[in-house]
């Protein structure tokens, strides 16, 4: 039998780019736009954000030592006297919430960013493209691109990254938690 059109869904896109692709399909159907889910209890944060940036976490499988992006973040952290940790890929963790809690800021893409935000940490979108710090002002745009980068058109180099890191503010963590857990 046929499915009633008003009940038919095409996937459940988690960002605007996926919604646009699903909406462009020849078959007309309702497209439902959802936000990236996160376990708000597991990633509830284990302490207040640090008043000063001391520790940066590279979070995710796309961070590969030796690549340009990894080297760029490592050099910026070294220049500013920041500790750098990496979780993902060969350095996977069964308790990423603990690694996030130990960091002051988290660099990553996608779900990693949402988990950092839920953990009340400053979140910096940096993948193949860069959006920088997630803030209330850019949240809709950055979230609409799935926290994958490229939502703001930002270009990054060492000087810009160092300047961004120097703009860290503990309030980012509080704001981020409220953005993903209203």
Image: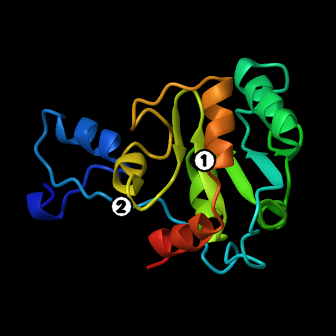
> What's the mark number on residue 11?
none
Q: Which of 158 and 120 is in front in this view?
A: 158
SS type, badge 1: strand
Q: Mark 1 — residue?
A: 124
Question: What x and y, as percent, mark residue 30?
Answer: 16, 55
Task: Tell me the quadrant of the picture where the N terminus can be found.
Answer: bottom left
Q: Which residue is drawn at 78% across and 49% down?
A: 57
Q: Dot 2, crowdedness within 10 Å: few (<14), some or many (≥20)?
A: few
Image coordinates of residue 130 in percent, x first then y, are 53, 33
20 on left or right of 177: left
Q: In which quarter of the image is the C terminus?
A: bottom left
The residue sitting at 68% across, 72% down in the picture is: 43
| Numbered marks: total | 2
The quarter of the displayed image where residue 60 is located: top right
Question: Up-down: is 54 above or below 159?
Answer: below
Q: Position of residue 27 (x, y in %)?
A: 13, 39
Looking at the image, tell me whether mark 2 or mark 1 is earlier in sequence order: 2
For marks 2 and 1, give the CA distance.
22 Å
> For mark 1, does the 10 Å Cα neighbourhood hold few (<14), some (14 to 19), or many (20 or more) residues?
many
Q: Residue at x 57, y 26 (%)?
A: 156
Confirm or deny contact between disc 2 and disc 1 (CB under 8 A).
Answer: no
Residue 34 numbered mark, or none: 2
């Amino acid at each position: 039998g046929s499915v009633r059109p008003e009940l038919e869904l095409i996937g459940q896109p988690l960002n605007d780019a996926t919604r646009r692709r699903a909406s462009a399909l020849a078959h007309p159907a309702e497209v439902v736009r959802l936000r990236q889910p996160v376990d708000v209890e597991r990633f509830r944060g284990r302490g207040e954000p640090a008043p000063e940036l001391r520790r940066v976490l590279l979070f995710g499988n796309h961070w590969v030592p030796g690549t340009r992006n990894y080297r760029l973040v490592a050099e910026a952290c070294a220049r500013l006297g920041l500790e750098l940790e990496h979780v993902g890929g060969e350095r996977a963790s069964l308790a990423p919430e603990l690694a996030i809690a130990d960091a002051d800021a988290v660099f990553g893409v996608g779900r990693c960013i949402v988990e950092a935000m839920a953990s009340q940490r400053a979140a910096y979108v940096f993948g193949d493209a860069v959006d920088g710090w997630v803030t209330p002002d850019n949240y809709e745009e950055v979230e609409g691109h799935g926290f994958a980068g490229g939502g703001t058109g930002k270009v990054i180099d060492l000087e810009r990254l160092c300047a961004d890191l120097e703009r860290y503010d503990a309030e980012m963590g509080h704001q981020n938690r409220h953005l993903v857990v209203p």
